[in-house]
Amino acid sequence: MSLIADPRHTRADLRRWDATVLAALETTRTVEHQRRLDEARRAIDEFGSDGYVGVSWGKDSMVVGHLAQSAGLPLVWIRVHPIENPDCVAVAEASGWEYSTIERWCRWERGEWRASGTLEAGFAEARERFGSRHVSGVRAEESGTRKLTCMRNGTVSESTCRPLAWWTGYDVFGYLLTHDLPIHPAYAFTMRGLLDPCTIRVASLTGRRGTGMGREQWERFYYARRLAVLARGPNA
């Protein structure tokens, strides 16, 4: 399956993606990758089948979703309407996986969508329906805060399993490629090759939290039509 093709991919985007594919496949041939994979499988086995896997259809959640299905853990997608990345649906459909959906809607206030509390409310429902224990795709490489979380709580804690805690982005892409899993098209939205696919995150659109580090410009470049719809409000 690999990368889901999209007409918004430029030639420069795809050249950068092809280079990432080569590096990711090379990573899968290393001893370090095999060690991380073995440790991830052991972590899931240790965690057991009591809980659920949160999937967002980004690269990390696709890996944990694939790994954790062997333990019989249910997959749960918390959808935050209407600001979710619209391409996630294509990844979900391409996966062919069975999953449960929890849906929440943002509030429309003062001419913009307010997402505060919606995701948290979705996780609260997930806890009620599936229990408080869950498998997460959090990786230490993504941020200083996440690194501290992984260092403080380890790969497996009482309520959370982080099997990818010490994986690199190349480890993740390599796993997806070698297991023929669908890859979200946004990872090749590299602003004509300027962005590293490993640093791109599949997140909801708009909102104040997503405007830093060039995120706003990135959204305008690849999701202009969707942003125009969102700007019209709930009656669009």
Image (tube, grey):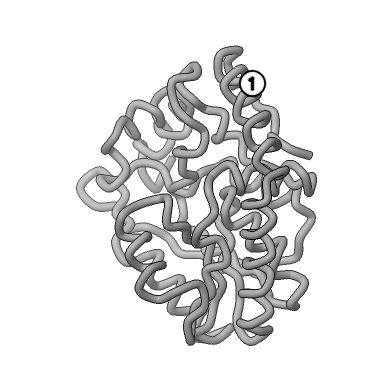
Q: Residue furthest left?
A: 110
- Closest to the observer, 82 or 20: 20
Residue, disc 1: 7
**Above or below for 149 versus 224:** below
- Closest to the observer, 234 or 49: 49
Q: Residues within 10 Å of mark 1 (few under 14, many from 20)?
A: few
Element carrying mark 1: loop
Q: In which quarter of the view is residue 49 placed?
A: bottom right
Q: Position of residue 59 (x, y in %)?
A: 59, 48
Going by the numbered disc 1, the residue's amino acid type is: Pro
**Above or below for 87 versus 18:** below
Q: Quadrant of the C terminus?
A: top left
Identified at 41% across, 33% down, the residue is 227
Q: Position of residue 193 (x, y in %)?
A: 49, 19
Q: Position of residue 21 (x, y in %)?
A: 66, 31
- Closest to the observer, 23 or 15: 23
Q: In which quarter of the view is residue 16 placed?
A: top right
Q: Residue furthest front?
A: 31
* Residue 121 left/right relative to 144: right
- Closest to the observer, 43 or 190: 43
Q: Position of residue 100 (x, y in %)?
A: 65, 70
**Above or below for 175 versus 39:** above
* Residue 177 left/right relative to 86: right
* Residue 132 left/right relative to 59: left
